[in-house]
Amino acid sequence: MIDLRAMTDPTLIRNFSIIAHIDHGKSTLADRVLELTHTIEDRDMMEQVLDSMDIERERGITIKAQAVRVLYEADDGKTYTLNLIDTPGHVDFTYEVSRSLAACEGVLLVVDAAQGVEAQTVANALMAMNAHLEIIPLINKIDLPSAEPERVRHEIEEALQIPADEAVLTSAKTGEGVRAALESVVRRVPAPVGDPAAPLKALIFDSFFDAYRGVVALIRVVDGHVAAGMKIRMMATQTVTDVEEVGVRRPQQVPVSELGVGEVGYLITGLKDPSLVKVGDTVTAAKHGSLDPLPGYRDVKPMVYTGLFPIDGDQYPELRDALDKLRLNDPAIIYEPESSHALGFGFRCGFLGLLHMEIVKERLEREFDLDLLATAPSVEFHVFKTNGEEIAIHSPQDMPDPGVLDRVEEPYLKVTVLVPPEYVGAVMEMNDNHRSTFVNMQYLSATTVDMHYEMPLSELIMDYFDQLKSRTKGYASLDYEYIGYRESDLVKLDVLLAGKPVDALSFIVHKDKAYARGKVLTEKLRKIIPRQMFEVAIQAAIGGRIIARETVSAKRKDVIAKCYGGDISRKRKLLEKQKKGKKRMKNLGNVEVPQEAFMAILKVDD
Amino acid sequence: MASEAAMRPAVSSGLATLAADTAAAALPVSLYVHVPFCVSKCAYCDFHSVPGHESWRQPFVDAALFEVGHWSHHDLLDDVPTVYVGGGTPTLLGDGLVRLVRGLRETARIRPQAEFTVETNPETTDAILVAALIDGGVNRFSLGVQSFDDEILRILGRCHDAEAASGAARTLRDAGAAFSIDLICGVPGQSFESWDDTLEKAVASGARHVSVYPLTVEDGTPLAVAVESGSMPALDPDVAADMMLAADVALAAAGMPRYEVASYAQPGHEARHNQVYWSGGAYLGIGPSAASMLPHDTYVRLADGEGWPLPEQDGGQPPLARTRFSHSSDLPAYLRRPLTAPTELEHLSEAEVKREDVMLGLRLRRGVLAASVEAAGLTAVLGGLADKGLVSLSERDGDARWRTTEQGWLLGNEVFGSVWAGE
Ligand SMILES: Nc1nc2c(ncn2[C@@H]2O[C@H](COP(=O)(O)OP(=O)(O)O)[C@@H](O)[C@H]2O)c(=O)[nH]1
Ligand code: SF4
Ligand SMILES: [Mg+2]
C-alpha cells in the first residue's frame, strides 16, 4: 500500500477522463474501476457511486463531472495513481466535459456495443482531439445479446477517423475487460509533465460550496506544489488567501500534506465568497508566484434564456443568494435581475440548454427550498433599429415596437442527427416543420445515417428533442453547434388574459408560424387555466391585432355539500388544501394561472 | 314557524342563546353514533363502513353502549337535545339496533321531545324493525335512496333497485314516521329526465325532508378508479349545477324550500341534529371515526380524566375556545378499547371559533347576523364575496343578516374557504 500522504512521482500518475454518449456506461464503468482498485469496499458500493447528487441518482444521469483518485497495481508490477474523471454525456453539459478534459492527458471513449456511435460520441471525441488528448476507444456492453463490436469498431473508424483495432472490449456490467482498459490507460495515456521546482501553477477545473468548509476547489497541479499553510493567489481575481487543507477524493475527501506535479485533488481555503474562486482560474504562490496564468477555458455562451421568479415575491433575496451559490458549482449559469408586471421581481437566466435549465430550476427548488416559476425559454435575438442602434435581447418583453424595427437576427445551429436509415424520412419531415435547411447526409454504416441541417436555435428549444425521440422510437441522437446569427422575419406574439396583456406569456415567433402558434397556444391555455368565478377570454395578438381567441367559461359549481356526521375538521382541511393550491398559482389581474401555463408555448408544435 | 321556534329554542338559535337560557343547567350535548356496517360497499363511498363482519355487530353495540355509559357517568350526557344514529347502515344491526336505541334512552338524559333519527337503507328497512325502533323512541328516519332510476343505482354501485327504495319509503310512511330521503345528482350518465323523475318520486314518497348531494369522486373509491381508467366519463360540474338548481325549483314547488346548502324540508321538519353542526352546538360522536365538538374547557375536563392529549399552552397564544376531535376508524381496535384517545384533535381559538361559526352559518338559508360577521372581523371578506354575487346583506325585522345567494350555494367552497381563511 502506497502512503497517500506522500507526493506522487509524476511518472506513475495517469489523469484520464471517461467520455461517452449518454447511457453508454461511463458511470457504471467508473464503479467497476473503483471496485477493481479496492477504492470502495463492496459493502459501500452503490450503483453509480460517483453520481452523488439526488437529481443525478433519480434521473440516472451524470450532471456534474466528478474526480476520484484510485491506486492501480499494473501488470508491470508498479502501482499507478489514476485520477479518474467522470463526465456528463448530455449535449447541454458539453461545457463540463471540456473543463474535465483540461485536467487530463487522455480519455477512455466509451461506445455502446449495441447502440454504436451516437451524436455525443462524436462531439466528445472531437473535443478530446482538439485538446490533443490520447483517445482510447472502448466498446462497452459486449455482454448484450445485441452487441455488435465489429460494426461499432467500423463506425468509430468511419465517423471519427481514429484507429479502432486496439479498442478495448468491455462489459461494465460483468467487469469483463475493465482491467484491460486500465492497462491501456497506463500504457497509452502520457504521464503528466511539469516542473516541480517552478512556482506553483494549478488549474481550478471545478468547485462547489460546502456549508461547513466554504468553497472547495478541484485542482490539477501543473508546476510546483501546493500544501496546507501556504499563501496562494488566485490569478484572475487577485485574491490572496491561506491554504487550509489539500487532499484527494477517494471519492470521500482525504487530506494529504501536499499535491505535486500532475496531481489532481481538492483545495480548501476557507473562502466563503463563491465569486472569488473562479473555475478556469490559475492558482499560484502569493509570493514569487508565476506571472503567466494557464490558458483559461473558453467562455461559455448560454443558449437559452428564461425568467425565474419566486412564487412568493418575498423570496427574491433568497433566490439571488441561491443563484450566487449555485453558480459557483455551475459556472455555466448567467443571470441578471428582471421584473415583470405579471410576475414581479425575478431573474433572467441563461442556460446551456433545456435540460440544463430544468436541472438548475430543480436544484434551486430542492437545495434552497424555493418555489419557482419559470417562463418559456427564449434565445438571444439581435435587434437592429431604424435609428441604427443595435441591441441584444433575451426576453420577448424587451422587443421594441415594430415601428422602430429595421430587422431582427436570430442564432442558427448546425444540427447533427444520427439515426437508423428507416427513420430518415421521419426526421426530414419533422425538420421541414422547423424552418431548417438540409445540408447533407452520410451513411456511417448499414445501421447509422449521419444527417446535417441548419436550423434556428429557437426551433430547437421548442420541444424538438422530445419530438425527435418519439418520432424515431428513441433511436435518434442529436448534437448541435452554434454557427452564427441570421436575419429572420420575427414578430412578438402577446397573450391577453381577460383583456389584459400578460408580459410573461409573450414570445417571439417567425411570422409564418405566428397564426398557427397563437391558435394552438390559446387552445392549450384554455385547457390549463381552471374555470374561475367569471368568464376569462384568452387572446393572442400581434402588435395589437387579435389573431386567436378562446374562452374559459365561468365556474358554476364548486361545493362539497356533504359533511357527514359533523366531521367539520375534515371538511375545513379540504377547503384549506384548495386554498393552498390556489396560492401555488399566479394571480394575474384576478385570473388564477397555474404554473404550466408559462411553459405551454413549448408544447404547441404539430 | 313562530311556535316551532319557541318549541326548540335550543337547536335553532345556537349555542349563545342556549347558554343564556339554561344558565345553570347542564351543557346540551347532541349525540351521534356511527354504525360502521353495510350490506356491501357503494362505488362512491369513502365513509367508514365494512360489509360482512356479522360476528362483530353485537360486540359493536356493546362497545357503543359502554362508551355512552361512560360519558353519562361523567355528566356529559345530562341534556341531550338530538340523537342521530348514522353510518354505515344502522338498520343492518336488526335487533341489535333496537337494543342500542333503548340503551341510549336508558343511559343518556335525552330530552323528552328530542329529535331521534336513525339512518337506514332500502334493503334493510323492515316494517317490524321500524315499528320496534319507533317504540324505542326513534321519531325520524333518514333513508338512503340516492336515485329512483335503476341504471343510476347500478352506476353508483348501490345494492338495491328503485322498487326497493319505493317500498322502503312506503314502509316508513305506513309506520307513521317522519322521514328524509337522500338523493345524489350529477352522476355520469344521469339525464335530466331521470333526475326530474327521481325528484318527483321523492316528493310523492311522503318524505318531508330531502337532502341533495352532487356526486363527488373520492380518492381510492371504485368510482375514482373507473373515472381514471376512462371506463366512466368524468363528472361534469355544469350538469351537477343544473341539477342542483332543478332540485331547488322542484322541491320548493312541492313545499320543501331549501334551508341549508344540501337540505330541503317542509317548514318545521328541518333536521334539528344537523343544525346543531351548523350553529356551534356541542356534540359527542360515539363509535369508530365519529367526530365530536365540545367547548374547550369541557374537553379539558374529559381529557384530564382519560389521560388524553392536552394542547401545549405556553401562555403566549390566545386562549382556546373549542375542540374538535374524532376517533380512529380502526374497528377492531375500537371493539377492544372504545375509549382510546382521539386520533384527530384540533383546538380553536376564540377568533377561529367566530370565523368558523360564520362559515357554518352561511350554509343555512337564514344566514348570519351582520353583527357576528363584524365581530369575527369578516365584514370586508363578505363584502368581497358580495361583489362576486355569492352573498348578500339584507335587513329583515331590524336584523341585518348576511345570506348566501343561489350562486353562492353552488360555489360554496369559494364562500366557505374565503371565510375560514379570512381573506
Ligand atoms: N448490459 C450492460 N448494461 C450496462 C453496461 N454498462 C452500463 N450498463 C447499463 O446502461 C445504463 C447506463 O449506464 P450509465 O453508467 O449510467 O451510463 P452513463 O450515462 O454513460 O453514465 C445503466 O442501466 C447500466 O446498468 C454493460 O456493460 N452491460
Ligand atoms: S350505504 Fe352509505 S355508508 Fe354504506 S356503503 Fe353505501 S354510501 Fe357507504
Ligand atoms: Mg452516468
Image (spheres, grey):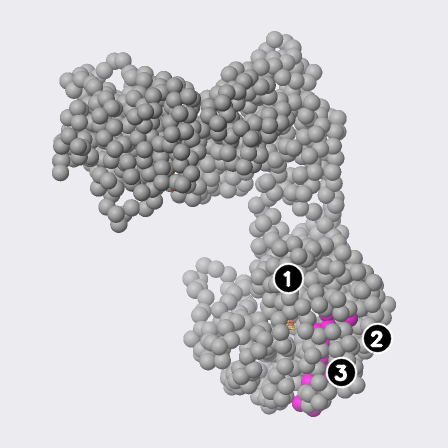
Q: Residue at x 46, y 36 (%)?
A: A359
Residue placed under numbered mark 1 in the picture: B223
Q: Mark 1 touching mark 3, by CB under 8 A?
A: no
The circle drawn on residue B204 is 2
- Near mark 3 (Cα within 10 A), the count class, few <14, some 14-19 or many ≥20, is many
Report the image quarter containing ligand 1: top left
Q: Residue furthest right?
A: B253
**Disc 2 element:** helix
User: Sequence-wise, which precedes: disc 2 or disc 3?
Assistant: 3
The answer to whether residue A181 is above or below residue B167 is above
Q: Is A29 placed left or right of B109 in the picture?
A: left
Q: Mark 2 touching mark 1, by CB under 8 A?
A: no
Residue placed under numbered mark 3 in the picture: B172
Q: Alpha carbon of mark 2 to alpha carbon of mark 3: how far?
A: 13 Å
**Disc 1 element:** helix
Please provide percent x and percent y for residue B180.
74, 75
The answer to whether residue B163 is above or below residue A536 is below
- Which chain hosts label 3? B
Q: Amino acid at mark 3?
A: Leu
Q: Alpha carbon of mark 1 to alpha carbon of mark 3: how far?
A: 30 Å
